[in-house]
Amino acid sequence: MTLRPVATAQLPEILAIFNEAIANTTALYDYEPRTLQKVQQWYAAHVQSDFPIVGAFDEAGTLLGFATYGLFRPHDGYKFTFEHSVYVRTDARRHGIGKALLEALIAEARKRTVHSLIGVIDADNTVSISLHQKLGFNFCGKIPQAGFKFERWLDVVFYQLLLP
């Protein structure tokens, strides 16, 4: 596995990863699949804002997963706090790819003016919670019934990593 920035050539693969997560998990609280146009707009906004999108690739150059961050909230006072996301292809999960991606994203954040990374995680996602705890993120709070998907209410938890 190699880690490198994602390019526009990977947008169809990113689309597939997003849409699998939408259809089958609570990693995203979206209901409808994304379109390639929406992913292109998302990518362009990240590039324009200079937000990293780190990809994990197998030996053949296939995208296994990606990690990124964006503004936590769109107000000036939050300009050093970012919400991050990590997505791994279904067949590549539980092989350390999420950990490698999050570590790379943390390293990238350390190079920039990031002070705080925030993970907003479905409270039942024990794998993601455990990963964040292992990498030094601290539990900051829980919002019960913040979302609704798959005909049930979902709680979200917040995990934060402060960077020196």
Image: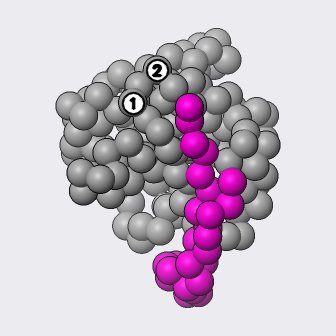
Q: Nearer the viewer, residue 46 or 32?
A: 46
Instruction: Indicate whether residue 65 is drawn in magenta.
Output: no
On the image, which quarter does residue 24 sit in?
Answer: bottom right
Name the residue rendered at 60%, 45% in the picture: 161
Magenta stretch: dominant secondary structure? strand
Marks 1 and 2: in contact by CB < 8 Å? no
Instruction: Tell me if mark 2 has few (under 14), some (14-19) or many (20+) residues whose alpha carbon lies within 10 angstroms of its own.
Output: few
Seen in the picture, residue 141 relative to 93 is either above or below; the reply is below
The magenta segment is 138-164
Residue 66 can be seen, yes or no: no
Disc 1 marks which amino acid? Answer: Thr
Callout 2: helix, strand or loop? helix
For label 1, the residue is 113
Name the quadrant containing residue 136: top right
For label 1, the SS is loop
Q: Position of residue 60 (x, y in %)?
A: 59, 13
Camera-nearest residue between 95 and 142: 142
For image coordinates 59% across by 83% down, the residue present is: 144
Q: Is residue 152 magenta?
A: yes
Amino acid on which the number 2 mark rests in the picture: Lys
Percent x, y of residue 49:
24, 34
Q: Quadrant of the C terminus?
A: top right
Q: Residue at x 24, y 56 (%)?
A: 75
| Along the line of sight, the residue nearer the viewer: 4 or 33 | 4
- Where is 93 relative to 125, above or below? above
* Category of crowding for the residue at label 1, using alpha-carbon neighbours closer than 10 angstroms: few (below 14), some (14–19), many (at least 20): few
Q: In the rendering, which numbered label is found on residue 111? A: 2
Residue 50 on image: x %, y %:
29, 28
Residue 146's spot in the image, x, y percent?
50, 80
Which residue shows up at 31% across the image and 45% down it?
A: 79
